[in-house]
Amino acid sequence: MNSLYDIIGIPFGYLMSWIYKLVPNYAWAIIIFTLVTKLLMFPINYKTQKSAARMQLLQPKLQKLQKSFSNNPTRLQEEQQKLYQEEGINPMGSCLPAFVQMFLLFGVIDVVYKPITHILHITKSIRTAAISKASELAEKFGDVNGGNAITNGNLRNELLTMESLNKHPDEFNNFGENFREVVTSFSDNFTVLGANLGKTPTLHPAEWNSEAVILMLIPFLAGLSQLLVSLYSMIHQKKVNPTAQAGGGCMTVMMLLMPIMSIWFAFEVPAGVGFYWIWSSIFSFLVTLGLNLYFTQDKIVAINEKEKEKARIYAEKHPEKKTFMQRMLEQQAALEQQNGTSAKSDSGEKMSRSEQNKQNRDAINEARRKMAEKYGDIYDESNENDDQ
């Protein structure tokens, strides 16, 4: 998992490094970096929101089908597939953009967590030695990372190393590349309103001063900003779909619980992480609000008609092609139909479990054989015995 963060974090790291050169203050760099990444992800957010809005527009028709064919799952699947095809909607359309967005967030998090790598460009050997020293000091003095060891696999190891250096600067004198001077200079700009973002917030500081207060407020602001996004999502969802009740109570609990967990977790990590969460939530709220204002009912209806026409034209030009979702629905319907009849033999007599299993295997092997013939592949019958 850490290698995934590293790979995706490289391009974002260069972006953050460039921003920091323009604005040599880490707090401002985080704000600008967060804004830029949100703008880069805007096309993905737009497609996700559009797909969700079109699916919302389709809900009355889907609910009508569910009532009409509640006792016939196979027919329900067929009618849903026809409806999706007529409307030109892929019900999984919002999943891929959401996955891509989550994938990109790995890189964003890696940059926020690893300023020594992505901004200072300290070599790996020096970073590893510094992390090892910080781990030794954490266990010895118990004033960083809760007194626990700081491993190379810990995503926060660089922020924790910076915190350890701030507490015990003389312990980092003998590292190459002027590690102590470079990181100390960076830490001086690693601040917001004079509070060092490399330090971990606490409710019980050794001394209550302006820095301690600011650091203590960051986790609460991170939770409140996420709560803002959650409450807005709940209100908007009820507005556009007032009849939706299934799972509502559980969803409400989760939306309220997540900000509380964010507050708790922000007290366990360096303040720079919580500071990033604050601005990430704020920009996410603004993007979501803007898109919801843009996707009015009339706008969605117009977009839906346009997409339907595009789907119709494409279907006429490519009658032999089927979408991935159409194939999935067809396969699911076929399996459900098969399962509905597999409990009985051709003569109508009830079958044993072993007989049902054999019939299922035969059906699967037959499907494999047909697929091989369709695509010109060679079907290896020995695989049938392997499956058994």
Image: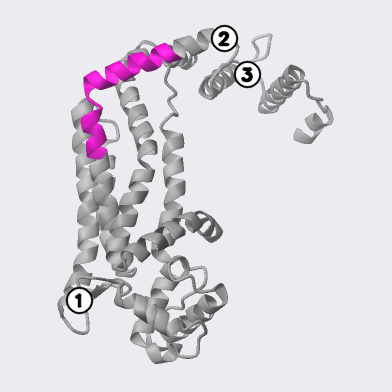
The number of discs equals: 3
Nearer the N terminus, badge 1 or badge 2?
1
> Residue 236: where, in percent of width, then height?
20, 34
Nearer the N terminus, badge 1 or badge 3?
1
Q: Disc 2 on helix, strand or loop?
A: loop
Three-letter residue code for mark 3: Ser
Q: Disc 3 on helix, strand or loop?
A: loop
- Disc 1 + disc 3, Cβ < 8 Å: no
- Residue at x-position 52% and y-position 21%: 329
Magenta-highlighted residues: 288-310
- What residue does disc 3 label? 342
Against 248, is 263 above or below? below
- What residue does disc 2 label? 319
- What residue does disc 1 label? 211
Against 247, is 112 above or below? below
Q: What colour scheme governs how the chains and residues are painted in the rendered image of this protein? A: one colour
Foreground of the two, 23 or 3:
23
Between marks 1 and 3 in the image, the one whose residue lies nearer the viewer: 1
Three-letter residue code for mark 2: Pro
